[in-house]
Image (cartoon, rainbow, N blue to C red):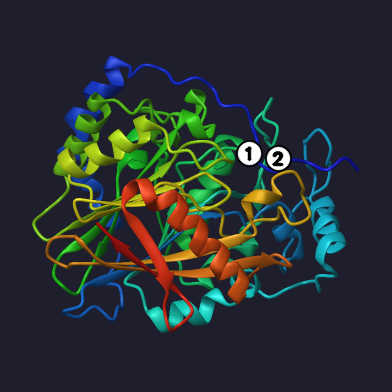
Amino acid sequence: MRTPRGDDESRPPMRPDPPARRRFLAAAGRALLGSLLVRAAPAVTTSESNAGVTLFLCGDVMTGRGIDQVLPHPGNPRLYEPYVRSALGYVELAEAATGPIQRPVDFSYPWGDALPELDRRRPAARIVNLETAVTTSESEWRGKGIHYRMHPANAPCLSAARIDCCSLANNHVLDWGVAGLKETLAVLHQAGIQTAGAGRNLAEAAAPAVFDLPSGGRLLVFAFGAGSAGVSPAWAATVDRPGVNVLDDFSPRAVRNIGRQIAGVKRGGDMVVASIHWGDNWGYEVPREQIEFAHGLIDAAGVDVVHGHSSHHPKAIEVHRDKLILYGCGDFINDYEGIGGHESYRADLTLMYFPTLDSTTGRLRQLSLTPMRIRHFRANRASVGDVRWLEAMLNREGRRFGSRFGAAPDGALAATWS
């Protein structure tokens, strides 16, 4: 079997912002988005105190394909990839690389050592980019090289980590067509998990997930998918068509449009996370347009945290005006084990991001990163050597942004910034 390359798909060109769509978002900003706040969940249990509000963020969580096959309820393994025709092939690749995986694993298995760390940290909200459809749909998106899906009966693997919000504005949520997207939304909502970035129409796709906080404020999570990360323009939600909240470009106009959306929902004491699927899978370079866009979201659109993902490995971190920017969180759970070709990036090393924000201003008070390593389709605590590798990489890439990291007594990496 020829070794596949994972998730490297062609990147379609971005499209201009259609005037009708722009007018719709502006008009719907207050009325429609405000009316969708019924999606807000009850107050999240948290350890919030005068120290602020701690969140859990991570990059791509891909529990489909090979991982779906080792969970209790594997779906149809059929694939339409050039070199792998069955999801079981990814299980075989992983086992060839690191040894047998006992099957079936329990629902908590993929999270491994992350679960006790989450219990210890007690974040106010747990936010991930779910990069798979959750569906039994057989309507694969024709012409797309890679399709991810997890059987709906395996959705308890997300509940096992008590995930609060799944960003769905990515290049895999429509892998199995509109039917797959609708089922994904229904399954997650039935499980009590909020979503952002995709919906049954544009108003739903653009609306934030909303969480009440004990401080009296709320956490708003908006999600956007960019063409640079393979999100097809054909997937864009419209007034009457399901799809993704597509980010057409990184222009000042786009910042203004997002600012209007946020202003239509945000109240005093609220904090805003912008979860963005953008950029290439591989490489440490952060394009100037991403930097300027992230700065614009903070300076002019009312965003407190920019949660960037799509890269298969962690990238640089910046603190801009005391607001956190994660340019690329890296994958957190995937079935890429045993796939060669980019070993120098150490994509098996992952991070749990725990920012603590001031509960009144949203400013970053503290940032702690817990290193993990993917092995046997499971998040495992990273070794001392692996932690040092991540520390050196983050310091090298963060130098241009004034961010530095050092080992903390608990084995995490603690951030300082200028």
Q: Specify the quadrant that holds the C terminus.
A: bottom left
Query: Of residues 127 and 287, which is closer to you in this image?
Result: 287
Q: Position of residue 139 (x, y in %)?
A: 67, 35
Q: Which mark is residue 176?
A: 1
Which quarter of the picture shows residue 82?
A: top right
In this view, the residue in front, 347 or 223, is 347
Answer whether labels 2 and 1 touch (C-beta < 8 Å). yes
Residue 352, percent from left and from top? 47, 66
Within 10 Å of disc 1 (Cα), the crowding (few <14, some 14-19, many 20+) is many
**What's under tag 1, amino acid-wise?**
Trp
Q: Which residue is located at x 51 percent, y 72 percent? A: 161
Residue 337 can be seen, yes or no: yes
In the orientation shown, which residue stands out farthest toward the left?
Answer: 268
Mark identifier at residue 138: 2
Residue found 24% across the figure and 30% down from its top: 25
Residue 90 position in % (x across, y down): 79, 53
Q: Nearer the viewer, residue 228 or 322?
A: 322
Secondary structure beneath dot 2 equals loop
The quadrant holding residue 6 is top right
Q: Which of pointers 2 and 1 lies earlier in the amino acid sequence?
A: 2
